[in-house]
Image (spheres, helix red, strand yellow):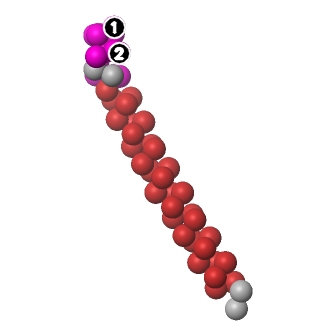
Amino acid sequence: MKEEILPQYPHLTTEIQTFANHLRYSIKMATVLLVLITMFGAILMYYGRG
């Protein structure tokens, strides 16, 4: 990104970097939530049989 995008838009460097950081954070949060939902679903299926 530093070689391709930022040289084309030098006046928007901080905004682009902030957006990229927020995007990474969103992907991490989505991954954590997906894992938690899957774990809770597995637990409910395991204990729901009994």
Q: Which mark is residue 34?
A: none
Q: Is disc 2 in contact with disc 1, using a CB cutoff of under 8 Å?
A: yes
Q: Quadrant of residue 48?
A: bottom right
Which range of residues does the magenta coloring cover?
3-16
Q: Residues within 10 Å of mark 2 (few under 14, many from 20)?
A: few
**Amino acid under disc 2:** Ile
Residue 9 falls within the magenta-colored stretch: yes
Would residue 7 be seen by someone viewing this image from the given angle? Answer: yes
Residue 8 falls within the magenta-colored stretch: yes
Q: Residue at x 57, y 65 (%)?
A: 38
Secondary structure beneath dot 1 equals loop
Q: Residue at x 48, y 52 (%)?
A: 31
> Looking at the image, is 3 positioned above or below residue 22?
above
Residue that carries the numbered disc 2 in the rendered image:
5
Compared across the picture, whether 31 is left or right of 43 comes to left
> Looking at the image, is 22 positioned above or below residue 30?
above
Q: Residue at x 37, y 31 (%)?
A: 20
Residue that carries the numbered disc 1 in the rendered image:
8
